[in-house]
Image (tube, rainbow, N blue to C red):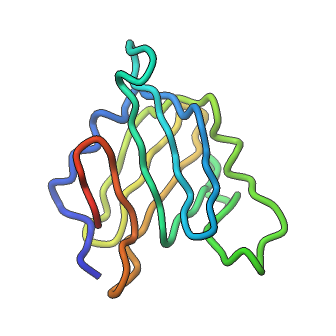
Amino acid sequence: MRGVPHDLDLSRFVGATLIQLCLGEFQVQFHFQAAGSAGSEGMLYIGVERGWELRDGSGALVDHSQSNAERDVYRVHRLLGLTVAGTALDAPRSFALRFRNGHELRIFDDSDRYESFSIQPGDIFI
């Protein structure tokens, strides 16, 4: 585990709206449109290859990463159309995006061998 940096700047996500989720065999992608931008300008992406979890405002687990063989359904779609209200760092373990409805998406660096997540633009690979 390389760890989430203590100085990871997530401020550009505040005010951004989650507009698309992409599900792949080994990755979930979260696509955001930054506030006040249009088209491909202002697009922000987080690609997650390892651990993530979604909790509601009360802290109850809504969805989380798991193998395709274990999964019946995804519930992360509940974030679509929602705006990020704040962020939190729990370096070196994880970071979180907090949405205006109280949901929190937490992304973990939980692998010693493989990339856990990436953030674009910025070429951030952890």
Q: Which residue is depicted at the point 40% across and 19% down?
A: 35
Q: Quadrant of the N terminus?
A: bottom left
The quarter holding residue 65 reads bottom right
Q: Quadrant of the C terminus?
A: bottom left
Residue 104 vs 93, above or below: the answer is: above
User: Taking 3 as reference, is 108 left or right?
Assistant: right
The quarter holding residue 111 reads bottom left
User: Taking 42 as reference, is 62 left or right?
Assistant: right
Q: Which residue is depicted at the point 56% across and 58% down?
A: 28
The quarter holding residue 54 reads bottom right
Give the x, y percent position of residue 46.
42, 50
Q: Which residue is depicted at the point 53% across and 65% down?
A: 52
Give the x, y percent position of residue 34.
39, 25
Front residue of 46 and 56: 46
Q: Which residue is depicted at the point 29% across and 43% down?
A: 10
Taking the view exactly as shown, the residue that stands out farthest to the left is 7
Give the x, y percent position of residue 21.
61, 44
Give the x, y percent position of residue 9.
21, 45
Front residue of 14 and 23: 23
Taking the view exactly as shown, the residue that stands out farthest to the right is 72
User: Taking 91 as reference, is 44 left or right?
Assistant: right
